[in-house]
Image (tube, helix red, strand yellow):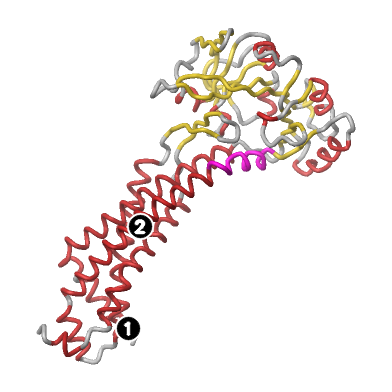
Amino acid sequence: MLSQIVAVTGVNLKSIRERAGSSAVAIIGIAGVVVVFVSVLSIAEGFRAAMAKAGDPQRIIVMRTGSDTEMTSGLSGEDARLIMDTPGILKGSNGPLASAELFVIVNHPLARSGTDANVPLRGVSPNVLQVRPEVKIVEGRMFETGRNEIVVGRAASRQFANLSVGNTVRWGENSWQVVGIFDANGSIAESELWCDARVLQPAYRRGNSYQSVYARLESIDSFQSVKDAMTADQRLRVTVIREPEYYAEQSRVLQSLVRYVGFAIAGLMGVGAVFGAVNTMYNAVASRTREIATLRALGFKGLPVVISVLTEAVVLSLIGGAIGGLLAYAAFDGYQTATMNWQSFSQVAFAFAVTPALLAQAMIYATIIGLLGGLLPAWKAARMPVVTALREL
């Protein structure tokens, strides 16, 4: 049986070139499905990567109890002081490595379309670069305390208009000068604009209030003790969460939405690709009627014929999947864009990410399409009556 399978399958694969036209139709159809599948899901992967890169397990975010985002949180200046003084927070030469922060949304045009978008403007403490050591000023300088100056994330400078060093922008009654651009390893922080929190508070009539405190722990293992100390303090009503966990939750809604849409679109296109594969394999079986009849007359079983047809369908689907994956990678990997984070209602700039895992999923999907497309033709070939087939000779 094994020798029959090898023999029939080998002959089948060698004859693909004789059916180049119909084979190309199946390959192109599956390649198109894979391109759409990979391109849509690469949005979710890129967004997830931007969120994941922002998370440092040695950094915590402290918000008001019951808040799931910074937008819904509120802390007084006294709350921020008590949080920073908690044992277990890493100390530097100028005090605790913690940044009390204020998060507001400003309307600013996108660079490509000119339409207004919700841009996150974050007020931070002067020691923010010690709290976030991965952030580096790559152009210009850091803002000066007490002045209407902002530094802009690298991704934000590309996606939003007029955010180059030296430009002045106006929001409400305040003008802000762009004095620097920072890099944050491609994380969500690069979508933000930073300024002095003490300047942002009166500009938006926030008084002496903040929305969150970012702090570095003395060690990764000190998280639970710090959390217990803060939640046990009767003067505080706070939620303490590791930064990676916070951003993972922030990305959940958009990732789920994109994945549902991506699978729905790929599923609909996959149905068309299956019909294309069915048509291709029926043509292949029809063109090999004499060959199949001869093999059956010589004593070959039906199973080798089934496997040979399915193998051809899978080979064609893998070729189409590989072509589609390469096209998607070349066209979309690293493509810069921006979208709405529905949990903070602000724009997030990020890059599409065509990952090896995503390409593997696409190849599996292409293989399934090939198997479904080859199943009925294979069954027909195996059940073809020998006498009927011999009439074709």
Question: Residue 185 location, x and y as percent?
Answer: 55, 33
**Residues packed near mark 2 inside 10 Å, few (<14), some (14 to 19) or many (20 plus):** many
Question: Residue 352 location, x and y as percent?
Answer: 44, 40
User: Against 56, is 164 above or below?
Assistant: above
> Any magenta on residue 14?
no
- Identify the amino acid type marked 1: Leu
Q: Nearer the viewer, residue 323 or 116?
A: 116
Does residue 45 appear to the left or right of 232 in the view shown?
A: left
Task: Report which residue position mark 1 lands on.
Answer: 303
Select label 2 or label 1 by which is in front: 2
Secondary structure at badge 1 equals: helix
Which of the 4 image quarters holds residue 233?
Answer: top right
Location of the C terminus (image quadrant): bottom left
Location of the N terminus (image quadrant): bottom left
Q: Look at the magenta stretch and give its main secondary structure.
A: helix
Task: Report which residue position mark 2 lands on.
Answer: 270
Does residue 212 appear to the left or right of 175 in the view shown?
A: right
The reply to whether callout 2 and callout 1 are in contact (CB within 8 Å) is no
**Residues packed near mark 1 inside 10 Å, few (<14), some (14 to 19) or many (20 plus):** some
User: Against 362, is 302 above or below?
Assistant: below
The answer to which of marks 2 and 1 sits earlier in the sequence is 2
Question: Residue 180 location, x and y as percent?
Answer: 54, 17
Q: Which mark is residue 355?
A: none
Which range is magenta?
243-254
Secondary structure at badge 2 equals: helix
